[in-house]
Image (cartoon, rainbow, N blue to C red):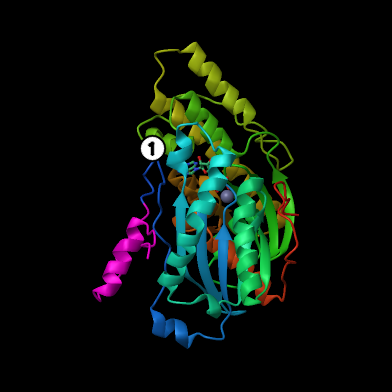
Amino acid sequence: MRRPFLYPWARRQQAAALHGGPPDFLEYDRGSPTNRLRPPFFHGRGAGWAASLRGVPLILAIESSCDETAVALVRGEAGCAATVLASVVASQIELHRQFGGVVPELASRNHSLHLHALVEQALQQAAVRVGDIDAFAATTGPGLASSLLIGSTAAKALACATRRPFLGINHLEGHLLSPFVGDTQVVAHVALIVSGGHTLLLDVAGAGRYHKLGGTRDDAAGEAFDKVGKMLGMPYPGGPEIEIRARDGNPAAYAFPRSMLHDAHLDFSFSGLKTAVLYTLQREAGKVSVADVAASFQQAVSEILVAKTLAAAQRCGRRTVALSGGVSLNQALREAFAQACGRAGLELVLAAPSLCTDNAAMIGFAALLRHLAGESSPLDGDIHPHLPLL
Ligand code: KG4
Ligand code: ZN
């Protein structure tokens, strides 16, 4: 029999389980510019505990909208805590890096290559069997069509084979709810989603009750980080690289523009900022400090995001602000939000670092809330590369 493929942390955990020791969990290295194979965000407590919770809905979720293949198992009841039993992510960043961005054909091929092993690994970590699962979920949009198809087809096949419901989940709802994973009660708040493809400001009355307040008129915040990273000669994705270089730079070295900062609307624009960085690099060719440019760019993005989000909270009368998406991993941004919310007397809810970039735990949590509300999706429903949140 072929030995099943296991990622390094899974091998360590399997070995620990065999020898009776506690599982060896790696900390997600936030400082790593690569965010390569990420260890799981795991709250498993062994087979006995899993068995004692039979009857509490259990969801298996798959995320494959872009360049991360992810599987998670999430369990919870209405009005109670939700638990992530397993969450595994295989990132393809190294693969796409040589091309300076995501190559859709390569992404989908690698999703299909790794998905089966990741499902096995997640089931093993959570100490549950396919037959224990109450519903199967997958991201059905927005994202790359060929990538979305891999995860959603797999989840539908599992749902079909086990005669359980299928839930198609909006990737943005996954990010939006990620700061609240763990509690099936989502408090009213203003949410900022900042990822590679989206910058979205929403008023959230509760799970499933969203009102758009603003969005980007050009580049997403993460896209701006990635493009400026490229200008600075950094590998893809530029976001984590800029954060690292900015630590040694002066955030006041360059007065980059804060577009639309004082406009009454709650939209964003990052193309002017990006162009200002380009002109600076052209003007100071050869003598520019990469650290200063990185720090000044990061400072400008942070100021814009903080100011618009706090204005939104004030306008909507919300006392809680939640931050999610890959860019929310940025420590300088997290600190800027913490300080501003502290000054304004607002509660800040941040997604856990392992839930900021793409993962299936957030998809499983969104699916759990919909499952608890009695929802399901048709098996003949399609994927939607441009699926809006509302
Ligand atoms: O949420 P995500 O994994 O994927 C999308 O749904 O788009 O976000 C990826 C984005 C990339 O643009 C990446 O550069 C950015 O998140 N990112 C960061 C950091 N880590 C990831 N941006 C700034 N600072 C970081 N530390
Ligand atoms: Zn995402």
Judged left or right of residue 179, residue 244 is: left
In the depicted structure, whether residue 22 falls above or below residue 323: below
Helix, strand or loop: magenta stretch? loop
Residue in front for this viewpoint, 57 or 216: 57
Q: Quadrant of residue 180?
A: bottom right
Residue carrying label 1? 244
- Hey, what amino acid is under mark 1? Ile
Judged left or right of residue 101, residue 38 is: left
In the depicted structure, whether residue 194 falls above or below residue 289: below
Q: How many marks?
A: 1
Q: Position of residue 339 (x, y in %)?
A: 48, 49
Q: Position of residue 313 (x, y in %)?
A: 66, 53
View extreme (front): residue: 1
Residue plotted at (50% across, 61% down): 116
Range of the magenta residues? 1-28
Q: Position of residue 317 (x, y in %)?
A: 69, 58
In the depicted structure, whether residue 119 falls above or below residue 133: above
Residue plotted at (45% across, 61% down): 117
Q: Secondary structure at mark 1?
A: helix
In the depicted structure, whether residue 368 falls above or below residue 29: below
Q: Quadrant of the N terminus?
A: bottom left
Judged left or right of residue 36, residue 179 is: right
Q: Position of residue 122 (x, y in %)?
A: 45, 67
Residue in front for this viewpoint, 103 or 276: 103
Residue in front for this viewpoint, 197 or 23: 23
User: Is 41 inside the magenta-drawn segment?
Assistant: no
